[in-house]
Amino acid sequence: DTGVSQDPRHKITKRGQNVTFRCDPISEHNRLYWYRQTLGQGPEFLTYFQNEAQLEKSRLLSDRFSAERPKGSFSTLEIQRTEQGDSAMYLCASSLTTGGANEQFFGPGTRLTVL
Amino acid sequence: AQSVTQLGSHVSVSEGALVLLRCNYSSSVPPYLFWYVQYPNQGLQLLLKYTSAATLVKGINGFEAEFKKSETSFHLTKPSAHMSDAAEYFCAVSEGGAQKLVFGQGTRLTINP
């Protein structure tokens, strides 16, 4: 199966620590998205890449959040100095631009718990 | 900016009964609309999408949705519920050239035996 993968699936950390999550998109997909989902809510857009370019990051929640996609393949999302409010599911999705409504394929997510 | 409202955070139906999950959107331009399903501890799976080709859209697992521009609605239906349909369902609208998804708050569907 060559779907979207995310690592780790679960992360428990202490407040103030830095965490990094990885997303591997479907190989031919040029767009990669990051979303955050809190309990009982729908996913919320954070940022996205087209190839290696980060085209929108205004929705990143604070300057503690950063994302990279260095070679247009996998991506990482880093949260510095984690806070309890960062506890959530972080979802990655990828898509291929075709000129129409591009379906986003989601990974299984990384569940972050900040103690 | 686009927005999505899902009426009813929790819907419960009997096995074999009609499933109706409601979604209303706001958009200043003709929208792309999606329904996704999420099973516990899993990512989201696309059920169906509306791209203006046809107002009645058929998806996987027997689900379908009808786009009604006059009502700004995109409700999801299934004629006969199955136990395996129990999950969280999200309606979403695609926004801007980035086609980032704006989601509703979700509806949890419970199927009673």
Image (cartoon, rainbow, N blue to C red):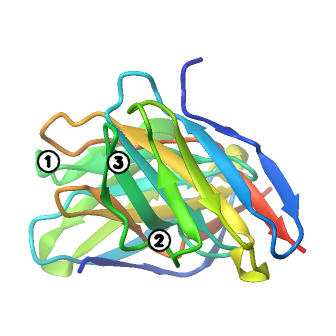
Q: How far from the left and from the top, in percent, is residue B104? A: 45, 73
User: Judging from the image, what secondary structure is the residue with disc 3 in?
Assistant: strand
- Determine if marks 1 and 3 fall on one subunit: no
Q: Which residue is under mark 3?
A: A49
Q: Is residue A109 visible?
A: no
Q: Nearer the viewer, mark 1 or mark 2?
A: 2
Q: Which residue is under mark 1?
A: B54
Q: Which residue is under mark 2?
A: A60
Neighbourhood count class around disc 2 (C-alpha, 10 Å): few under 14, some 14–19, many 20 upward: some
User: Judging from the image, what secondary structure is the residue with disc 2 in?
Assistant: loop
Dot 2 amino acid type? Leu
- Disc 1 to disc 2, how far (Cα)? 35 Å
Q: How far from the left and from the top, in percent, is residue A19? A: 73, 58
Which quadrant of the rendered structure holds the C terminus of chain A?
bottom right
- Residue B3: numbered disc: none
Decide which of A88, B19 is in the foreground and name it.
Answer: A88
Q: The disc numbered 1 marks a residue on which chain?
A: B
Q: Is residue B28 above or below residue B57?
A: below
Decide which of B67, A38 is in the foreground and name it.
Answer: A38
Name the residue rendered at 43%, 22% in the picture: A27
Q: Is residue A107 above or below residue B17?
A: above
Dot 3 amino acid type? Phe
Q: Is residue A53 visible?
A: yes
- Disc 1 to disc 3, how far (Cα)? 30 Å
User: Judging from the image, what secondary structure is the residue with disc 1 in?
Assistant: loop
Q: How far from the left and from the top, in percent, is residue B9? A: 60, 79
Dot 1 amino acid type? Ala
Of marks 2 and 3, which one's residue comes earlier in the chain? 3
